[in-house]
Amino acid sequence: MNFIFLGPPGAGKGTLAAQVAEEYGIPQISTGDIFRENIKNQTELGKKVKAILDSGGLVSDEVVLEIVEDRLKKDDCKNGFILDGFPRTIPQAEAFEKLGIDVKVVNFEVDNDLIIARLSNRRVCKNCKANYNVKFMPPKVEGKCDKCGGELFTREDDKLESITHRLEVYRKETEPLIEFYKKLGKITDIDSARDSSLVLVDFKKLFPKK
Ligand code: AP5
Ligand code: MG
């Protein structure tokens, strides 16, 4: 099964994608993670997109599409994949449709106040990228990853002004995709304002493993 996880920043796309990837044995393809990895390694791409990510703007459709199309050609996508954070604009969605891949779109529903509480308390493992939240999903030992012991850090774009900008960009550029996929009959809503284990239970009921 192929999935697109659609929703505002902080909706829990990455958190659920990691759980589903493990349970269903399919890769989580996070465009945001790909960009952050390139920034960390100071690649040409990383240098090009750093300021955009820090401010919470969007990387150009052209750059994103090239990366996603390349990634989907890899062998591990043969039995399915989760696109976490792509598409994010109508041109990206139209370009993806042209690939003719059957996909289920999961729309994460959560309100603004919770988004801000989640993002401003998020911590991410430097090593394995696992997600934590000092308020809602704390690690067992402060500042350390439960899975690999790596150091936890705060994402550059989880500062309040960047969060506000990301939400504006989401409403303007990405929210219209809900209508786009509704018209194609591909979208399923999921209430992601609840505990992450309950969100996973819902997901498994909606999309039973084949
Ligand atoms: P990206 O990395 O995709 O960031 P985002 O969309 O802003 O989404 P987040 O990762 O912030 O939120 P999430 O929904 O994954 O939530 P999470 O699970 O972490 O993109 C970053 C940037 O890259 C973009 O701003 C853009 O510049 C660029 N980019 C990426 N894709 C692009 C594209 N297609 N086109 C153009 N540019 C692109 O959860 C958040 C927090 O809440 C965590 O702390 C977590 O522990 C906690 N939490 C999650 N679920 C729950 C729950 N159920 N209960 C309690 N706490 C929870
Ligand atoms: Mg994410």
Image (tube, helix red, strand yellow):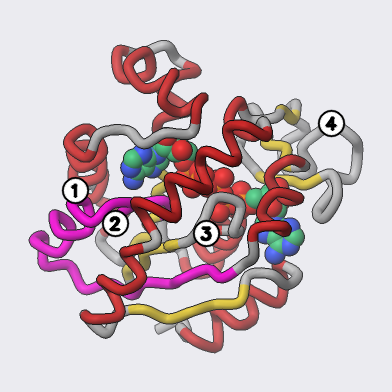
Nearer the observer, 191 or 29: 191
Whole-number angstrom distance, CA of label 4 to CA of label 1? 36 Å
Nearer the observer, 209 or 160: 160
- Identity of the residue drawn at 17% across and 36% down: 62
Dot 1, how many residues are within 10 Å of its Cα: few (below 14), some (14-19), or many (20+)? few
Whole-number angstrom distance, CA of label 3 to CA of label 1? 20 Å
- Residue at mark 4: 143
The secondary structure type at the circle numbered 4 is loop
- Identity of the residue drawn at 53% across and 65% down: 20
Q: Earlier in the sequence, mark 2 or mark 3?
A: 3
The secondary structure type at the circle numbered 3 is helix
Quarter holding the N terminus is bottom left
* Residue 192 higher or lower than 171, as above or below: below
Magenta span covers which residues?
Answer: 84-109
- Residue at mark 3: 17
- Residue at mark 2: 77
